Image: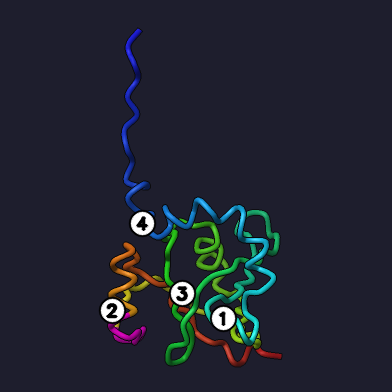
Amino acid sequence: MGASVVARTDRAKERPLAGRIFGLFTPYLNGFVARLAGRRFVPMWSLLRHRGRTSGAEYATPITAFRVAGGFAIPLAFGPRANWVRNVLADGRATLRWRGDAYPLARPSIVDVATPGVALERWKQAVFRALGVDRVLLVEDDAEGRG
């Protein structure tokens, strides 16, 4: 019998270099990082709370987020098909703990890192592009959702 050949799918290309690298450590670090994420003195990490699109379960995912006019930009280091991204897009809502405060989020959309509304500094855009991250999840701060 000959060896079978497995074709590479487009899905493999959707996951940026950053996701392929950090994905190796994610299962081991997420629990630790989730305990620190979003605290006032840990500006690199934020904690995204979202609901599962099929299970309805609540999840908390450590992510990196940047404040932009009217909301936040969340780099898609694991690509647009990451479960948390699909959950937020399906529900249209989430909550972000960022620098010690909680922000209800609404109206998510996936945009290019260079989109004017994202307004990330050019050096950040360059770092993300070098890591293969060319899209962000743009979410609005839903001030009316604060209760």
- The image position of residue 98, as x and y in percent, is 59, 83
| Marker disc for residue 91 | none
Looking at the rendering, which quadrant does residue 46 occupy? bottom right
Q: In x, y percent, where is residue 10?
A: 32, 46
Residue 122 painted magenta: yes
How far apart are labels 4 and 3 at the CA level? Answer: 16 Å
Q: Quadrant of residue 41?
A: bottom right
In the displayed structure, 59 sits above or below 65; it is: above
In the rendered image, the vertical position of residue 90 relative to residue 81, given as above or below: below
Residue drawn at (51%, 61%), measured in percent from left and top? 86
Q: Position of residue 77 (x, y in %)?
A: 42, 63
Q: Are marks 1 and 2 in contact (CB under 8 Å)?
A: no
**Residue at horizontal 54%, vertical 70%?**
63
Determine which residue is flagged by label 2. 114
Q: CA distance from mark 1 to mark 4?
A: 27 Å
Disc 2/disc 4 C-alpha distance (Å): 18 Å
What amino acid is found at the position of numbered circle 1 in the picture? Leu
User: Image point 48% across, 83% down: which residue?
Assistant: 72
Q: Earlier in the sequence, mark 2 or mark 4?
A: 4
Q: Earlier in the sequence, mark 3 or mark 1?
A: 3
- Give the magenta range: 116-123
Mark 2: amino acid: Ala
List the residue tagged with mark 1.
105
The part of the image, by quadrant, that contains residue 105 is: bottom right
Q: Which mark is residue 74?
A: 3
Q: Which residue is mark 4?
A: 17
